[in-house]
Image (tube, grey):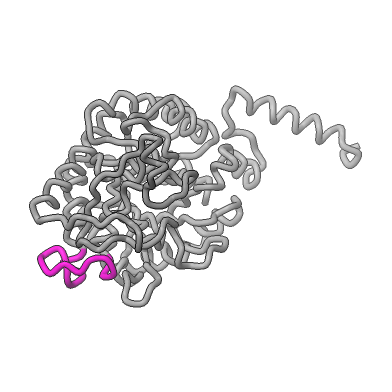
Amino acid sequence: MLLRPLKVRGLELKNRMVVSPMCTYSANDGIASAFHAIHLGRFALGGFALVFTEATAIHPMGRITHGDLGIWSDAHIEPLKRVTEAIRWNGAIPGIQLAHAGRKASTQRPWRGNGPLTAEDVALGDIPWEVVGPTTEPMDEGWLQPKALTVGEIGEIVTAWRDAALRALQAGYEVVEIHAAHGYLLHQFLSPLSNSREDEYGGCLEGRMRFPLDVARAVRSVWPTDRPVFCRISATDNVVGGWTVEDSVEFARELKALGIDVIDCSSGGLTGANTAARIKRERGFQVFLANQIRAEAAVATMAVGLILTAAQANGILEQGSADLVAIGREALNDPNWAVHAYLELAKSYERWPEQFGWWLERRASILASSSPKAS
């Protein structure tokens, strides 16, 4: 099943293998460079059906670090076109994740500490900026205190998300994903641990879902009807009193009703820098979340999290736990992961790029015929 195509709205994915959005923190003023085109283009060349560009900030205030990609300005469109062209030319569909970091913004690049900006960072030119959130409660001790968003400012961010989707369309993206996971702004509104507001955007589950659903409605309204919209969620905080998988099932039902096509099921990240710090990391540790949401919300899901081998990924799909698998760090380790999956499961170089697949197949035949076993 991993190798079979999947149609989502009017878009056909050639297989079920997706490159997960992964931040590289390598932009200047949000502008994509040749690095991004080469970095993402190699996954397309490596056989993946859908390649997501990393979390791309819809507003400069919504960047995680100074190195984040951005899409808050028309100046970002042309550089991102070079990225989508590299992905599409090499045989994959380009997707983009649209994000706002909220109170987790204005931080260090991971290799500089992955925490709040320090005097040393300022000396290097990384100046802190004001962060926002559902309340004035910071993410953790020592982190910037956010400004609590007003109802009017929430509306402005919804508009910024819609405008970012329109720019993504101009840049050539065919799939858009709303980032509502990992402790970033929309997740901050969803979780009762971070949202203690007493207005229409807080309180009960309906109130806490209101802002993320407003964003989903706005993005879906401008995204072409024949193209899919994904939403990445942290399906559980895995903390007592926090967001639960049962909440995620209800959220997924509401998203589906608005026309969201696939729920990308991650977890954790509400506090601390790690994206999934609350569930023990082991192979496929988040698959059960995709399975439960798929079964109970009757919506397509994408599984992610330490999916390492083709056999493991195929098993997830064959068991009905998800409709797609997202490969993250393992794709960084092996950009050819998808074509290696074809080789493992189908014993064929057919889906390798023809420019070198033919030679690898010939080499394999030569090696097989010259082996002692063959003789």
Left or right, 102 with reference to 370: left
Pinpoint residue 261: horizontal percent, then vertical percent: 30, 51
Instruction: Reply above or below: 343 against 204.
Output: above
Residue occupying image coordinates x 39% and y 38%: 53
For the C terminus, the image quarter is top right
Instruction: Reply above or below: 214 against 50.
Output: below
Farthest residue toward the left? 152
Q: Nearer the viewer, residue 346 or 84?
A: 84
The span picked out in magenta is 191-208
Residue occupying image coordinates x 22% and y 42%: 225
Farthest residue toward the bottom? 240
Pinpoint residue 151: horizontal percent, then vertical percent: 9, 56
Is residue 152 at least partly visible in the picture? yes
Residue occupying image coordinates x 17% and y 58%: 148
Q: Is residue 198 magenta?
A: yes
Residue occupying image coordinates x 42% and y 46%: 6
Which image quadrant is residue 180 in? bottom left
Pinpoint residue 216: horizontal percent, then vertical percent: 21, 51
Q: Nearer the viewer, residue 240 or 302?
A: 240
Instruction: Reply above or below: 107 against 263.
Output: above
Q: Is residue 54 magenta?
A: no
Dominant secondary structure (helix, strand or loop) of the stretch shown in magenta:
loop
Is residue 95 at least partly visible in the picture? no
Pinpoint residue 199: horizontal percent, then vertical percent: 10, 66
